[in-house]
Image (tube, rainbow, N blue to C red):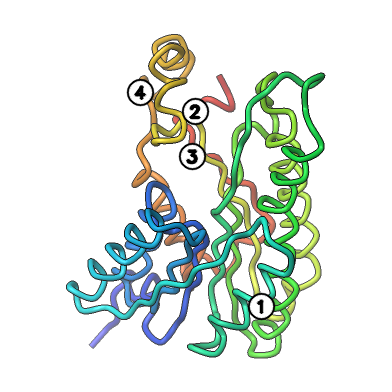
């Protein structure tokens, strides 16, 4: 019996760690990966609200017949990435790493404080780097791995009030290109998935005032939804995307070319 083309999207016996997976984009990607058979490590930042949200994601996966576990780690703390990598690896070796967790602290460039700068660097760059250091080499040693960094259209269209956040996303893209070259020959792909204007809790207030003007500049004619990222993530995390490496893929309704 011939196999289905969809078989290349299936992730049975693969384990995925999705950071910031308790809601919105991270949740949508985690549920999508679980839906095609992956075990899910659902990371959250260790507050009561985030723990409750992560537990709800785990329950939803388990109720659908999948396997998942919640892992807490505040990326602003020292060695947070190393500690999360160790905890998840003790549960299961990680085959797929989706770096979704990030924070943005809007403010004018001339008012950026040391503490707010350091917090964004810690969460958006330092802790993700530690995860890459600990998890990517074992993927290469096993001959298979997928890394997807969740970027932003701000990599090329930085908002004036988000200089630090936009800069971290540009740096993350550079890292994806760098690691794609280093590990591509070991069966590991590293790609960046860049959302455009996605309606999430984080930007709901901003979109209430700027949304109509922004939609007018989006060829698709609407704001994005978190689940708009799921299909692209499945491609980049599966065998179907095995020959896609070092790509910066916009999911923005055409905003990047408008």
| Secondary structure category for the residue under label 3 | strand
Of residues 151 and 91, the one drawn nearer to the viewer in this rendering: 91
- What residue appears at the point 29 percent right and 75 percent down from the top-left corner? 4
Verify CB contact (< 8 Å) between mark 1 and mark 3.
Answer: no
Rounded to the nearest angstrom, the CA distance separating label 2 from label 4 is 10 Å
Of the image marks 1 and 3, the number of the one nearer the N terminus = 1
Tag 1–tag 2 contact (CB < 8 Å):
no
Q: Nearer the viewer, residue 37 or 240?
A: 37
Q: Residue 24 vs residue 140: left or right?
A: left
Q: Earlier in the sequence, mark 2 or mark 4?
A: 4
Q: Which mark is residue 222?
A: 4
**How far across and down, in percent of the image, does residue 223 sit?**
38, 26
Q: CA gap, disc 1 to disc 3?
A: 26 Å
Q: Callout 1 environment at 10 Å: few (<14), some (14 to 19), or many (20+)?
A: many
Nearer to me, 57 or 158: 57
Residue matched to label 1: 135
Element carrying mark 1: helix
Where is 129 relative to 256, above or below? below
Residue indicated by mark 2: 254
Image quadrant assignment for residue 87: bottom right
């Amino acid at each position: 019996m011939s196999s289905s083309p969809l078989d290349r999207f299936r992730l049975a016996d693969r384990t995925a760690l999705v950071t910031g997976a308790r809601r919105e984009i991270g949740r949508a990607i985690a549920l999508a990966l679980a839906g095609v058979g992956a075990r899910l490590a659902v990371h959250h930042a260790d507050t009561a609200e985030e723990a409750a949200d992560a537990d709800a994601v785990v329950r939803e996966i388990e109720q659908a017949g999948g396997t998942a576990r919640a892992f807490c780690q505040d990326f602003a703390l020292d060695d947070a990435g190393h500690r999360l990598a160790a905890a998840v690896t003790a549960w299961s070796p990680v085959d797929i790493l989706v770096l979704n967790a990030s924070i943005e602290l809007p403010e004018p460039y001339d008012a950026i404080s040391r503490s707010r700068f350091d917090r964004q660097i810690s969460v958006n760059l330092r802790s993700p780097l530690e995860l890459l250091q600990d998890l990517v080499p074992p993927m290469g040693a096993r001959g298979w791995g997928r890394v997807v960094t969740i970027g932003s259209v701000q990599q090329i269209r930085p908002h004036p009030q988000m200089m630090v956040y936009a800069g971290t996303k540009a740096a993350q893209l550079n890292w994806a290109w760098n690691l794609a070259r280093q590990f591509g020959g070991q069966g590991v792909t590293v790609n960046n998935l860049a959302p455009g204007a996605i309606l999430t809790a984080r930007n709901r207030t901003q979109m209430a005032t700027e949304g109509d003007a922004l939609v007018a500049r989006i060829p698709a004619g609407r704001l994005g939804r978190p689940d708009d990222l799921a299909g692209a993530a499945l491609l980049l995390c599966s065998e179907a995307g095995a020959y896609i490496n070092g790509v910066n893929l916009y999911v923005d309704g055409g905003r990047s070319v408008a």
